[in-house]
Amino acid sequence: MNPLARFETIVAFRFMREGLTQTLLIVAGVALGGGVIVFMSALLAGMQTNIIRRTLNFQAPIQILAPDQVARPLREGEAAVAAQIQPRSQQLRSVDQWQKVRADVERMPGVTGVTPVVTGPGFARRGDATKAVSIIGIEPETYYAVIAMAEKIVAGRDDVGPIDIIIGVELAKDLGTGVGDKLALSAANGSASTLTVVGIFDFGNKGVNERNVYVALRTAQNLLDLAGGATSLDVKVRDPFAAESIAQEVRDGGDLRVDSWISTNAQFFSAMSAQILANTLIRIFVGITVALGIASVLVVSVVQKSKEIGILRAMGTARAQVLRIFLIQGGVMGLTGSLFGSLLAWGFLLMWRGVAKNPDGTPLFIIVIEPSLFAIACVTATFIGILAAAIPARRAAQLDPVVAIRG
Amino acid sequence: MAETAASASETLHLSGVRKSYGVGTPLETEVLHGIDLVLRHGEFAALIGPSGSGKTTLLNVIGLLDQPTRGQIFIVGQDASTLGEMELTQLRGRAIGFVFQYHYLLPAFTARENVMMPMLAARGQADDAMRETAAALLDRVGLTPWRDQKASDISGGQQQRVAIARALAMNPALVLADEPSGNLDTQNADAVFDLMRDVNVKSGTTFLIVTHDPRLAQRCDRIVELVDGRIVSDRANPNVVRRG
């Protein structure tokens, strides 16, 4: 059965065409409202994706560390000797049986990669220049599967051998060094090694570019006096937002300190939650405004067409048919408005891409225009339209034909 | 109330029909006081009476647009008092055609679409047979050249003829006309009346026409007079000799 040849559809479209100005105005209103929602949603999603991507550029979603060392009070029988217990200073320690932990975590659902890391403080020296750095010992083949390092290399290569080092652009500038140059790397315990700069990275973060230096895992183990150890296991997960629940599972599995990027970036997440809440509120209010607009137009239409509705009823039109005539109008207004709104939002997003740029000409952040967002907006607007039409439609269906015809 | 049965030759049978407004309130007013009326197939009757006598109320009750307070209504043998809302709507659409003083055409639709409307409401979807029936009805009322014109773009007389064609769309057994020529000049009033008479003669459709115009009433087979909600006279018109 052709839905466009149905009685209710034919009458609904003619009623809308008859009140063309009203119809166009409300469709324009829905288009603007829908456009704002789609544009804001895409912008917010783009911003969030961008911030998350930047954060996870140099931070694993989950980090497994050795548990904190705690001070134990001296006891004599049941009574404690010490009156006051000071927190213990934390030594650089390896995760106990990290190979077993790594194998266990690799088997967990949602985990896509685990890599051992040795991290500790050190100094990089070249000539008279010395900079405090964070030594990061990595196993390149597994580390690059967790941290997208390769794409951040701006000079040289990403492969680090036993006598190689990769440094950030800021550190390279401070030390006046480049690819192929040598620099001395020493740890706080006095161990030192002379390494060749094989690569320079840029994470787009000044602190990281200044501080982090990457060496082979074994090199870091030797420098930091942690033979065969790993100070942490960096874990990559398929869904970054599932990191905290997976981290909790690891915590439950043994005596380990497990940090997820969600818990270590709590401030960012509370800001993001506030942003999502604000956006949701705006969406709700715009949705209500659109619904009220459609409802008010249809209420007026029912009043204007009460005689026609009365005559339709006299001719044998059922109440349910009258109800559907107005529900169809609400749905069509919502759908048409949202289609135009999606087009509008798409145009704005393209414009935004052209305007919002970094000083170097690269996009401020990447906005992915998801067709599903437009589809969701259209379905929601159609539903809102039908819902908004419910009251006027019910009113029309309940019109007494005698009263309606008499006017 | 005694049970009444309608005979097969009756299009309309009213038995003890009463209609009150404001039922159960101190302002309760009875407008129709026990109307008994039978219209047989093919009758062409006028319903006359002074303003406020209850003619339109009676027409609305007969047309199943309004419920009687008491009494029985049989339309083509079917007892309307036993029917639910949906069945009443279906019976109204199938068996009764309405012509009002004002045409009440849907202005956004063409003349043909207006005529199609009762068929469309009953069957749910437009088809070619429906379009052909509408065209034939418009041809019958002499409006073929105007069939694709918007209802709002044709003259008052033409609009009323479209309304008659629309009333005949479902081939109803009974057409109720409430002052169908009340808004027309004499020439157009005569034309509309002649048209209804022609349909009555050729198709055997029963007509009940409310009119204030004694000239037109005198052209009906039967004249029913209503005064203060009571039928005070119901007589065959000796001036009219049935044709056909």
Image (spheres, helix red, strand yellow):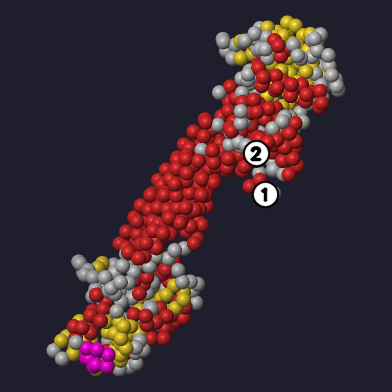
The disc at residue A2 is 1
x then y, percent, for residue A109 = 50, 72
Mark 2, residue position: B148
Picture quadrant where residue A386 is located: top right
Element at label 1 = loop
Q: Is residue A135 left or right of residue A176?
A: right
Tell me the kind of residue under disc 1.
Answer: Asn
- Residues at marks 2 and 1, common chain? no
x then y, percent, for residue A193 = 24, 93
- Distance Cα–Cα, label 2 vs label 1: 23 Å
* Residue drawn 18% across the image and 83% down it: A174
* Count of marks placed on residues: 2
Depicted B173 relative to depicted A262: above or below: above
Question: Which stretch did the figure color magenta?
Answer: A177-186
**Neighbour class for label 2 at 10 Å: few (<14), some, many (≥20)?**
some
**Residue ranking furthest to the left:** A128
Which one is in front in this view, the residue at disc 2 or the one at disc 1? 2
* Residue drawn 50% across the image and 47% down it: A334
Q: Nearer the viewer, residue A357 or B20?
A: A357
* Residue drawn 27% across the image and 82% down it: A168
* Residue drawn 46% across the image and 81% down it: A103
Identify the chain of the residue marked 1, using the numbered disc in the image.
A
x then y, percent, for residue A275 = 34, 56
